[in-house]
Amino acid sequence: MIHNRHHQVFISYAHEDKAIMQKVRSFLQKAGLKVWTDEEILPGTPYWDRDIEEAVAAVNCMVVILTPNAKTSDGVRTEINLARSNHIPIFPVVALGDPNEYRFYHLAGTQQVDIRINYAEGINRLVKSISRMLDGISENSLVSNADSLQAIVTQEFGSNWTGIFFSNTNLTGTGETISINSALNFSWGYQPPSVNRVSVPSITTNHFSVRFIGTHDIAVAGVYTFTVTSASGVRVAINGAVVLDRYVSRACTTDTFDLKLNSGPALMNIEYFNDGQDATLSFFWNLVRK
């Protein structure tokens, strides 16, 4: 038996998208919302499906993380049906890929929140939408917290990146340099790359590569977990040392690694290429211990 009557939001997600869920949950909690996920179910629980049913029935709303993995998840489909049968409002959040390719019949017509292009803007919109829906909650308090999320997103995703795009997959030749004042959270699909909905000049196919460079302030010294989701290949270097090398053609995959950082500026270099796949790249980090 679970006791979650004080939870306001249930997050439904495919287990392959655990890192995405954890980041969304973190921001919702920082905005002042009480969130329930299946990570609260203790290992070995015999009737975990009953806990899921009770949790859905007890919350005020459901957030569904929409990705290609979610489309094939029996769990996500079941939880959506539970929300509908309990008349629980659903907030679909587009996190990866092209939502036109993984539509959920029961979510047709439901307004979606897109966090692929501008993460902070999308999360703010989600928090404000939930705050307007909740009864007995001070909307001004939640909206105030939502407005402060931009600074948190900057700390954990970075901003002020420089992207150098190449019309090949090996980072050679003359690149197209673009300033990026937002997180690295892209779902280009099978289209040529774009930044802030503007196509990258001279890149006309989804066979391309890009080098992102940014110096970001690490406010607190400690061990950080970095999460990188990509399709096709990616390589990450921090302060001149390669810490992740997956620069090979592959389907969408999420990698994580831990790294101890001192406070102060950290130089981050992310190299990415796509060879005609469903182009996706997301990069963020969070402090796990001081």
Image (cartoon, helix red, strand yellow):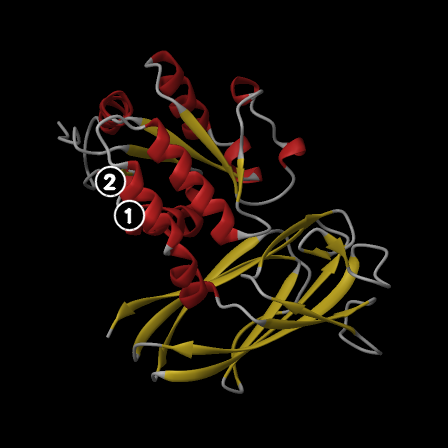
Is disc 2 in contact with disc 1, using a CB cutoff of under 8 Å?
yes
The label shown at residue 113 is none
Q: Which residue is mark 2?
A: 34
Q: Which residue is mark 1?
A: 29
Q: Residues within 10 Å of mark 2 (few under 14, many from 20)?
A: some
Q: Nearer the viewer, residue 118 or 135?
A: 135
Query: Mark 2 or mark 1, which has the lower sequence index?
Result: 1
Q: Position of residue 90 (x, y in %)?
A: 42, 26
Q: Position of residue 275 (x, y in %)?
A: 76, 58
26 shown above or below 87: below
Q: Position of residue 238 (x, y in %)?
A: 50, 80
Farthest-out residue, top: 85
Measure the C-alpha gap from mark 2 to mark 1.
Answer: 6 Å
210 shown above or below 88: below
Q: Quadrant of residue 58?
A: top left
Q: Amino acid at mark 2?
A: Lys
Q: Amino acid at mark 1?
A: Gln
